[in-house]
Image (cartoon, helix red, strand yellow):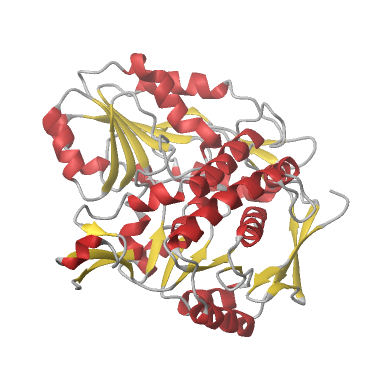
Amino acid sequence: MSELIALDALGPQGTYRARNRVTVTDVAGVPAADLGLVPKLFVSRTMAALHRAESLPAAERIAALARAARIFTEEEIGGLSYEEYRRTVARVSGVPISVVREATAAIAEAAEQAGFVVSQPRPAGAVGDWRDPGTRDGSAVWTRRGSVFAVHAAGNHPGPHSLWLEALALGYRVAVRPSRREPFTPHRLITALRSAGFGEDQVVLLPTDHEAADEILRGADLGLVYGGDEVVRKYAGSTVLPQGPGRSKILVTADADWRDHLDTIVDSVSHQGGVACINATTVLVDGDPAPLAAAIAERLAALPSLPPEDEKAVLSVQPVEGARAMESFLLAQAKGTVAHLGGEGVVEELPGGGAVLRPAVHQLPKADARQAGIELPFPCVWVGPWSPADGIAPLRESLVLTVLTEDEKLVDALVEEPSISNVYLGDHPTYWIRPGVPHDGYLGEFLMRTKTVIRH
């Protein structure tokens, strides 16, 4: 990447070239892009402009989103073709190119199907517009809780950018603060949305430093933030929806043979480089966990270590310093467990720069061992024993739980458990998802409300 890619803010009056610039580097430390960071005053004025703006009519929004999907995937944007953009994302974020392709295709699909997706959370008793004939006799109407939505985007994976498109489809004006690790996807997506018909004062890109970041949330009616447990605690119950660790799990009970499901178990751990919140972090089995842990380790040990832009790459890559820090954290936290893979380290430095995070498999002494709550952005899995006497307590706080069992009473308890967001019964990997089904509840449940309208 000899010539730096210029990434500027996309404000309410077009592209804004900020004076404060930072260099975005790839996994080897090679400069890749020049990113402008806007000051707090620019953020304040931008958020005020979003509040003053008017949204497109519903039908026009849905049509514009479909057009944006085509522009996003087919046209040159910011000097980059679609394939050049995806290779840049892989090289800079360290996410394998095959994963980037899958994630960006999902973003386009979310834009194309936005009309269907946003209709799913609407209550059966509500209509979508006060003009609907149903309101003549009185009806609930599905309405926004606000007008401006702010997003502090994640940088570990392009996929989450498909989620905030729902807010745009529902008529919110949207402000996105990109991650410095991966600002390319939101920049390309917002440029495509503007080219498709959304006004410059309807969707904006606001790269900022930390001081100005909170101003984006303060200036919005509602917000979405990605982060760890600290972020979840900070924003829980507020007008900001936190998206934290997934801690997704798999449970194999005594009436199922894990050997029949090993492909699904391993795939749940390693799919998309193990970087996502829907990758399995913990696998619990009724009985001795050692054979299962050994089998998972054998499969994961065979995965190759390759640069992220290699077509055969399946593991994520990070700058060496960051990878070593993560390795040190894992080794310290894993004390008291039995290592089946990665016990002496998980970092493999690449000749061209950067380091692959190799898989790790550790056996827990008990189902509720503290390590079961540790989620890391690579294939790192904790395998432990479980028995019916343990109950569902070790399975709580899971974004996804795949359960291999014939025990319907157990399934009843898991589905009813509030802290388990999704339950997959049978041979379904934890990463299964499709447009129209909730990820961590429907975003529409947070963005919308019902109000009664009756008219002549």
Q: Is residue 90 above or below residue 344?
A: below
Of 374 and 200, which appears nearest the observer?
200
Residue nearer the viewer, 134 or 142? 134
The number of numbered badges drawn on the structure is: 0
Task: Identify the residue at image location x=34%, y=40%.
Answer: 400
Is 388 displayed left or right of 228 in the figure?
A: left
What is the quadrant of residue 357 in the picture? Answer: top right
Residue at the spot 21% in from the left edge and 66% down from the top edge: 135
Rendered position, 288 above or below 29: above
Residue with the most extreme right position: 2
Q: Quadrant of the C terminus?
A: bottom left
Seen as rendered, the residue at the extreme left is 409
Q: Is residue 232 left or right of residue 85?
A: left
In the image: residue 356, left or right of residue 63: right
* 371 with respect to 408 (left or right): right
Q: Which percent across, then down, holds residue 254?
A: 21, 20
Task: Please report the residue visible at 87 percent of the width from the left and 54 percent of the height from the top.
Answer: 3
Residue 213 lies, with reference to residue 389, above or below; the image says below
Is residue 164 shown to the viewer in this render?
Answer: no
Does residue 255 lie above or below 228 as drawn? above
- Residue 295 location, x and y as percent? 43, 18
Q: Residue at 65% across / 73% down in the picture?
A: 11
Tell me where residue 132 sits by quadrant.
Answer: bottom left
Q: Is residue 288 visible?
A: yes
Q: Quadrant of residue 178?
A: bottom right
The residue positioned farthest toward the front in the image shown: 456
Q: Give x and y (percent) for residue 16.
A: 72, 74
User: Which x, y percent locates residue 333?
Assistant: 45, 45
